[in-house]
Amino acid sequence: MTITDELQELYEQGLAAFKDATDPASLEAARVAWLGKKSALTSTLRGLGQLAADMRATVGQHANEVRGQLEEAYQQRKAALADAALAAKIQSGRLDVSLPGRSRPIGTQHLINAIADEVSEIFFGLGYRLAQGPEVEDDFHNFTALNHSPMHPARSASDTFYVRDLSEEAATFDGPEPSEVLMRTHTSPVQIRTMQASKPPIYIISPGKVYRRDIADPTHLPQFTQMEGLAVDEHLTFADLKGTLDYVVKKIFGEERSTRFRPHFFPFTEPSAEVDVSCEICHGAGCRFCKGTGWIEILGCGMVDPNVLVNVGIDPERYQGFAFGMGVERIAALRYDLPDIRLLIEGDMRFLRQF
Ligand code: DAH
């Protein structure tokens, strides 16, 4: 075989080897075998020196051409394998861009909390501060200090949830008797706790959960939300109470609404009143919405009974107070014309998302 034939054979075998390489490892092995330092082609090139001078130039040129072509075949195969690898990768991780995305709905404040915050903000603007108290209360703060007589019906076990502590610590507990521990029935005990803990002037607003043994129906819930307000200062009169609540009710329901104060009774205020807001539909004329009265009841209030001030060690000769309590679910029901306040606690997103 002439050296030319040998080179031709090397060329064809090398080409075939690169073509047969189906992955980077076998391609690299082929490169080492056909283009590497120990390859037949390299030794042929090294042996050129022993050739007769006239043959050296032609054979050398031929050998270099073979080397260049094999080098090119190798590079092409390398690029082709890289393209195939990329295509396979894209194929395996393929995204179906027509699929609907995963939605991450953004939570919002519940309507009850939103209204409680909104009303609190109105009072903050008047210089009131936030006060909080426990939901598990004792008889003293929930009833006695608030001037309820020992036989007051709200104390009955059919109206109030009493709490019995079944834990081991209860045996050594030296607080109130178990029968005196209850779920607070209103936010008014926060008045007592605040007056015990701080000196007048006091201006507080206290939103929170309250509990009553009521069966849930369109206008009642066994657990609902109240907002308690208390002002204790020198020279406070019923006119201050009226002015404050009229201002706040207009802020909540709209400037065009008016208020009406009706005499009422609460054990902890004297005098006491219930406050009505003029009917949104008929503006006082009387319609089906307000049952023909023209007014809708929204809160209870009054001047803090001197007995209550005495119960917490505040001198009723020097200080006067006014207080009020309103139901947040009721405000929501009136403002959004809700047919049933149970909607507020059922967690039905179709309802809650509207607000
Ligand atoms: N605690 C009363 C209730 O739950 C609401 C109330 C009325 C609170 C008059 C007050 C008030 O502070 O002065 O029905």
Image: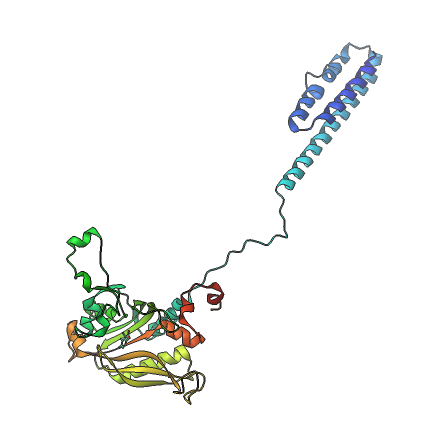
Residue in the foreground of this view, choosing between 223 and 18 = 223
Q: Residue furthest bottom?
A: 285
Where 178 sits versus 115, above or below? above
The residue nearer to you, when weighing 182 against 16, is 182
In the rendered structure, the answer to whether residue 54 lies left or right of residue 227 reads: right
Q: Residue at x 80, y 15 (%)?
A: 6
Q: Quadrant of the N terminus?
A: top right
Residue at (32, 72) in percent of width and height: 227
x%, y% of residue 98? 64, 53
Q: Is residue 60 visible?
A: no
Is 9 situated left or right of 75 in this image? right
Residue at point 71% right, 21% down?
35
Colouring of the image: rainbow
The count of marks equals 0
Q: Quadrant of residue 147?
A: bottom left
In the image, is residue 94 above or below residue 290?
above
* Residue 25 visible in the current orientation: yes
Left or right of 351 in this view: 197: left
Residue 65's spot in the image, x, y percent?
A: 79, 23
Find residue 212 and report its image quarter. Answer: bottom left
Q: Position of residue 63 (x, y in %)?
A: 78, 19
Locate ligand 1 by image quadrant: bottom left
User: What residue is shown at x 69% (from left), y 22% (from top)?
Assistant: 30
Q: Nearer the viewer, residue 81 or 347?
A: 347
Q: Residue furthest right?
A: 54
Percent of width and height locating residue 168: 20, 51
Q: Quadrant of residue 132?
A: bottom left
Q: In the figure, 3 relative to 19: above or below?
A: above
Indicate left or right for 235 with 223 as reference. left
